[in-house]
Image (cartoon, rainbow, N blue to C red):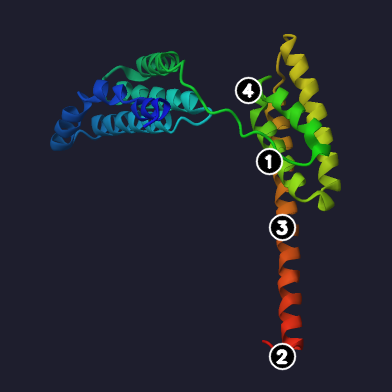
Amino acid sequence: MRPETYRRGLRGLALPVFALPMVPALILALASGQSRTLLGLVLGLGGVALAVTLLRRGRRGARKQASVALGLGLGFAAALAGGAGPVGGVILGLAAGIGAHFAYGGLREPPPEPYQGDSALEGFARRLSALEAADDRLGGAVRALRSLLREMSLRPALSSQARGLLVIGLDGLERIAGRLSRGAEAPRELREAVRDVESAASSAAAKLRAAETEALDIQVSVLRQRLREEGVA
């Protein structure tokens, strides 16, 4: 077993150890019918289990997702089962999430899959790679544009309209990233704008795949027709 595989298998396994006291408390709450306490403990254990699962997968963004899951789970556990109340639950949940974030700060996440495609699109690929490291708030749109770029590289004959969307999206995101890097305050509409780019890119990629499926259907129909003409089928 490679060292990296071994380390990935051990990620997050310390979290259930600290959650062990919640197990007998869960049994007692179940036996005594304390529904509020039971709900808090179930949410707490569920948050721990989800955090461990995400950390062991080791995918990109797993550390952030695991921190959020752990913080939410333990926050609800503290508020509902620990008697900390809403304010105490929020404080303890934040402490747990931030602690997990820093505890697994050295978690190595796999780099994005290198782009391999049409040389005419390599410039777009380099610009997307630069944007990936620019600002996390643009991540959804950048990933959608990268998926669109992959579809375009597979279907260059069908990608003329998608190219226009790619150019507009890249140009807009680069300008936004530049402003943010110089300290500009993000407007309220930024999240909606990023979602608009993400939705448009995903839709364009889906249309390219649909066009490929339609072309395949036509080819299958032509093949069957030719076979019938030859008296084979």
Amino acid type, callout 4: Asp
Earlier along the polypeptide chain: callout 4 or callout 3?
A: 4
Q: Amino acid at mark 2?
A: Gly
Q: Is residue 215 above or below residue 86?
A: below
- Gap in angstroms between the C-alphas marked 1 and 4: 17 Å
Is residue 92 shown left or right of residue 177?
Answer: left
Q: Report the residue marked by disc 2.
A: 231
Q: Nearer the viewer, residue 64 or 131?
A: 131
Residue with the mark numbered 1: 147
In terms of depth relative to the viewer, which is nearer, 35 or 226?
226
Q: Identity of the amino acid at label 3?
A: Ala
Quadrant of res 34: top left
Badge 2: how crowded within 10 Å, few (<14), some, or many (20+)? few
Q: Residue at x 13, y 37 (%)?
A: 31
The image quadrant where one finds the N terminus is top left
- At horizontal 74% and vertical 19% (from top left) the residue drawn is 177
Distance CA(mark 3)–CA(mark 2)? 32 Å
Lateral position of residue 226 relative to residue 96, left or right: right
User: Of the residues shown, which amino acid type is indicated by label 1?
Assistant: Ser
First reached walking from the N terminus: tag 1 or tag 4? 4
Which residue lies under the disc numbered 3?
Answer: 210
Mark 3 vs mark 2: which is more N-terminal? 3
Q: Which residue is mark 4?
A: 136
